[in-house]
Image (cartoon, rainbow, N blue to C red):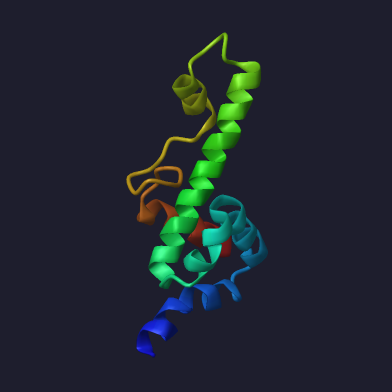
Amino acid sequence: MRGEQRGKFFAFSLRFCREAVRLEDLVYRRYGGGAASVLAMPFAEGCELVCHASDAEEEDRLFLRWAIMYQASMGFEEFKAELLPEQGEHGDGDGRSAAEILEDVKGIIG
């Protein structure tokens, strides 16, 4: 019983997410018949899989764009590097430290 409750946590958590419909659509598009398994995963594992699916979809879109328009003028990795922002120390964001972000937030809030 405990394992069942834990496994349903990810699907349950999606209900409270602002972008739940978009996330479910992504999961069904990417994993098709295995989507039910993804939605039944524990929250942390499900989130990792959703992040992976999102990254893979972004890479697919970039590849198609490169193949149609830029293949003759530059390599894919060069094209991708020009379009994607540099990733910070933890793999995403703009590379600012937590202290810098906090200072920006304080400036906005007042």
Which residue occupies the extreme left position in the image? 89
Residue 105: x percent and y percent? Answer: 50, 59
Using residue 105 as the reference point, say whether residue 68 is left or right of it: right
In the picture, the quarter occupied by the N terminus is bottom left
Residue 63: x percent and y percent? Answer: 56, 28
Say above or below: 41 vs 34. Answer: below
Which residue does the image show at 48% across and 16% down from the upper left?
A: 75
In the picture, the quarter occupied by the C terminus is bottom right
Residue 10: x percent and y percent? Answer: 48, 73
Residue 43 image-quadrant placement? bottom left
Residue 60 image-quadrant placement? top right
Q: Is residue 68 visible?
A: yes
Residue 65 image-quadrant placement? top right
Task: Out of 86 and 58, give the one closest to the viewer.
Answer: 58
Which residue does the image show at 37% across and 56% down from the upper left?
A: 98
Which residue occupies the extreme front position in the image? 33
Say above or below: 56 vs 46. Answer: above
Task: Out of 104 and 59, give the one closest to the viewer.
Answer: 59
